[in-house]
Amino acid sequence: MTMSRITIRCALAWASLSSLASATVITTINSALVVGDPTQLGRLSRNGIPQDWSGTELFPGVINSSTTYRYHAYSVNIGLGRFVQIEMDSVSPNTFISAYQTAYLPNSAGGPAFGFNTNWLGDAGFSGNSPSPDSVFFQVIAAPGSNIVVVVSNVGAANLGVGDPFTITVEGFIDSEFTDLPPVPEPATISLICLGLGGVLWAGRKRGILAARGR
């Protein structure tokens, strides 16, 4: 194997290992809804049932289909952590969080769901921290390597809840036992492995050349 091939293979190995998350937390978002965010007509009903990995929550339905609400959609790649837990810390009773697979399509269809049910994975069931002061959280299962869309919307007319700060934490696990994703070796470790492999193969190649020359 030539040195160029060693380099290529080590690079591919590092790229593969780097695709694994080194920690459970996939992303943390600190933000708030703003007046410039998109709008939708209607919103998900707050049924008081946070989704979990067993699928306890059924689609909650849509209410107030003639009322305008603000929302913001965050696309998050979950990597290998298909068991996803989403937590939102918000003291505002006027912000609500839900999750969708790949795309969020409100008002894309007729009633009674108006497209809010398309790609729906689950939601928190409550708005704001519940029970206060604890953060609200829920769980969904998504396709490995895919993007989920985490949606925050306000729940009151006339922009009620817009400007209220929140923190979202998205975590990924291998299974429902909260097994963390495999750790990723440090870049220095990969480099040493690749350098060592290259040195061994280069030394062997050199011995073969010397032997062929009768030295």
Image: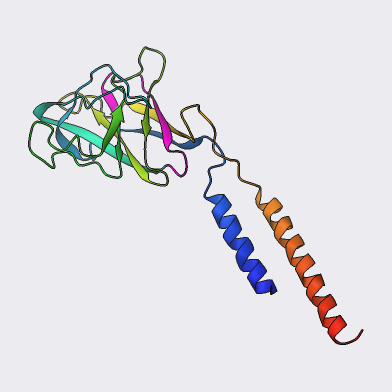
- Count of number-bearing discs: 0
Left or right relative to 160: residue 7 = right
Q: On the image, which quarter does residue 125 sit in? A: top left
Position of 192 relative to 137 (above/below): below
Q: On the image, which quarter does residue 111 sit in? A: top left
Range shown magenta: 78-96
Residue placed at 72% from the left, 56% from the top? 193
The residue closer to the viewer here, 95 or 184, is: 184
Position of 131 relative to 145 (above/below): above
x, y (%) of residue 113? 13, 32
Residue 79 visible at all: yes
Residue 215: say if magenta: no
x, y (%) of residue 61? 16, 26
Q: Residue furthest right?
A: 215
Residue placed at 84% from the left, 85% from the top? 212
Q: Which quadrant is the C terminus positioned in?
A: bottom right
The residue closer to the viewer here, 101 or 30, is: 101
Left or right relative to 135: residue 207 = right
Residue placed at 9% from the left, 29% from the top? 65
Residue placed at 60% from the left, 57% from the top? 13
Residue 88: say if magenta: yes
Left or right relative to 105: residue 26 = right
x, y (%) of residue 32? 33, 32
Q: On the image, which quarter does residue 159 sit in? A: top left
